[in-house]
Amino acid sequence: MNRAFLLFAFMVVCVTYPAHPQVREFQSPPTLVPVGPQAITKVTALMLGRKPTPSGGCEQGTIEVNGRITKVTLQEMYADSTIFNPDTNRMDPLHLRTYGGCNEGPLLTVSPGDQLRVKLINNLPVNDPSCLAPPPKGLTMPPGVGCFNTINLHLHGLHISPAGNSDNVLLNISPSSQFEYEFDIPEDHPAGTFWYHAHRHGSTAVQVSSGSSGVLVVRGNRPYTPPTSENPHPIADIDTILHTADGAPYPEQFFFLQQLAYACFSNPPGQDGGPWQSIFTANGPFTFNSPPIDPPTGPPSPANSKWICPMPDNHNHASPGVIENFTLQLDSASIWDTNGRFTSINGIVQPTLIVPAGQIQRWRFVHAGVHDTINLQIVPAVAQTDKNNLIAESKFKGSRQEQEADVLQQCPAAEQTLVPQFEIASDGLTLKRIHTLAGRSISGADGANYLQPGYRSDILVAFPHEGWYCLLDQAAAPGQRFQPGSGKGGGSGRSVPQLLGIIRVVGGQSINGDLEQYIEEALYTVNPQLPEPVRSGLKTGNIEPWAPLVESPPATPGPQQKALFAINASPHGPPLFQINGQSYDPNVVNFRRQVNTTDDWSLSSIGEPHIFHIHVNPFEVMDVRRVLPNGRELSIFDADGRCKRDLPKDPQGLASQYCGMWHTFRDTVFVENNYRVLIRTTYDRYIGEFVIHCHVLDHEDAGMMLNIEIVPDLNAPGGGLGMAGMKHGP
Ligand SMILES: [Cu+2]
């Protein structure tokens, strides 16, 4: 399509559909201020193909690109901002720990072979009540949780060194100090969608649910090259084939999905800095004396009612929305179901995105939330004229529960009308086949894109006709959700669909016929340089030449590794969050393995689902098995890797989100009760200590994490590290 026409269409849109005061425009992630000799070039590059993002007061960081070295300054700081609350139809004030001042950290972009240097400046106050022993009354926390002003930085999904000043999550960066990270991205690193976030044990959940996270994109320009006997699978980047006929990359959009768990606290006069003991809720103050939060059923009480932010006056001293009390705000399986907060996109609740019909776009989704499963669907809205503007017509008011009827009425999901999502990468890694999520089964994996905390999904999407569309977090069966509580698998409360965003399709060209064919035909047509049959493979969704990982080496002989997630009762004190019966101890190495070996791991959960994540190396999903009550295990896949249709009925509903995962490579995976997930991972290249953990980050903080150490040679003294007998300190 002609770019001048698109520009014209865009201008027409702006003139014809002025932003309604209540319409919140979709925004791309914030970007850093370019400095240094190449600043002008960088600014130009940043503006290409994308509207400049209003800084929103978050210019508290810089980027300097000098050849292969990208220097970034990130400030961890308290910042005052706002977020829309559909419940009250106004902006709630926020006072959160952020990277640079926005609700979402700045977009970072690197290329394979780059060195990314991040100067992480911790500008949080030294005075940290969560770091006192014991903490103030009402701020009690599980063992290991606290010191919310101590930070570090993790690049999630990157294959880089976990040691020293690289992706080392065992560092503590104290308030009022700074540290310079050097991340060497290897030349052969896959291009894809990754993210970065705070990862200091004990403060991870508080900081990430406060917005200390952002998108990290690795862009690649390595074209397809034919295999040779020496290099049977040369690396090639899918970025090189996703373009229009005139060579312009498909327009891309980032959807950084956050679950900011802010609450407004009642503080005594003159004590703006805490002590964070009493949350304003619709049913009165929620304090450490309130009844337990779980389960969310039963009569309304402060513990299971929505949080409110009253305007401060002489009678109340309401704080802005903060995240300061781990136990009240995060340490509950069901709190996100009832607290009234909405999943946001790039820091905005229910934004409206404008796209032309017929245009193929690349959408990059990152689940940067802490608690809630997101079940993505795109459906046409019922209201289809500007007069019936979904927002202006006062639809979608109230809490998620109160909006449910409007969502169901305005955004009805139907098999025939669901807009298909063509997934090309999961967890940043290009798939071997395009995974079509279309409307054959509305509640099953065919119709929805299940994102669990930590997941990424890159899709190609094209809208067939002008009109309004809803981006939904669709209601999901209990067995597909993270939220536990029943003791029998996922899903405590009733799952409620949430409107995540609105898509306004204007201009462009309608598509008649099959969307899958339209996209695959487009890929075929615009890439004439590719040899047959690689090129014709695109017509059937075969993208294996651009998949960075195709097959793991066989597992090294030896015992299989296992990770059994369970919350275990403690004889004295709060429940223990454990893997293999062990709570996290930073001084213990739980697994020691040799570099360049390959292990099979068996993952399971008891009591409620958890989310497995391993640093540094991705894994291949080898199999997913239903575990029947008699202990028998049945693979959910048939010989072709498709989900079997004849499995015995699962009372929780088949966890069909696994259906597309057969032999895919990922770094994070949902582990549902009564399932066993079998994975294979190679400890490739890097030595050092890193972690596996549950990506429900409050579980991680509370102990659901283990250390793994990769050594040069298990048979050498000390695993090959240090000199034998050498003393380390006193
Ligand atoms: Cu967990």
Image (spheres, grey):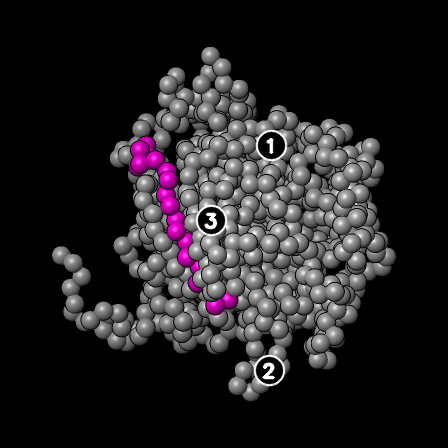
Q: What residue does disc 2 label? A: 227
Q: Which residue is mark 3?
A: 62
Can see residue 198?
A: yes
The residue lying at 47 percent from left, 65 percent from top is 68
Amino acid carrying mark 3 in the image: Thr
Which quadrant of the figure contains the N terminus? Answer: bottom right
Residue 15, image x, y percentages? 78, 38
Between discs 2 and 3, the one toward the N terminus: 3
Q: Earlier in the sequence, mark 3 or mark 1?
A: 3
Is 88 situated left or right of 381 in this image?
left
Dot 3 falls on a residue whose secondary structure is: strand
Q: How many numbered marks have been drawn onto this rendered protein structure? A: 3
Asked if the beta carbon under badge 3 is closer than 8 A to the nearest atom of ligand 1, the reply is no
Q: CA distance from mark 1 to mark 2?
A: 52 Å
Q: Viewer-proximal residue, 658 or 723? A: 723
The type of residue carrying mark 1 is Phe
Residue segment shown in magenta: 112-131
- Where does residue 178 sit, x and y in percent of width and height? 34, 47
Nearest to the observer: residue 441 or residue 20 = 20
Q: CA distance from mark 2 to mark 3?
A: 41 Å
**Which amino acid lies under the numbered mark 2 shown in the image of this protein?**
Pro
- Which tag, 1 or 2, sits closer to the chain's start? 1
Q: Is residue 116 magenta?
A: yes
Q: CA distance from mark 3 to mark 1?
A: 28 Å
The residue labelled by disc 1 is 84
Residue, far right: 512
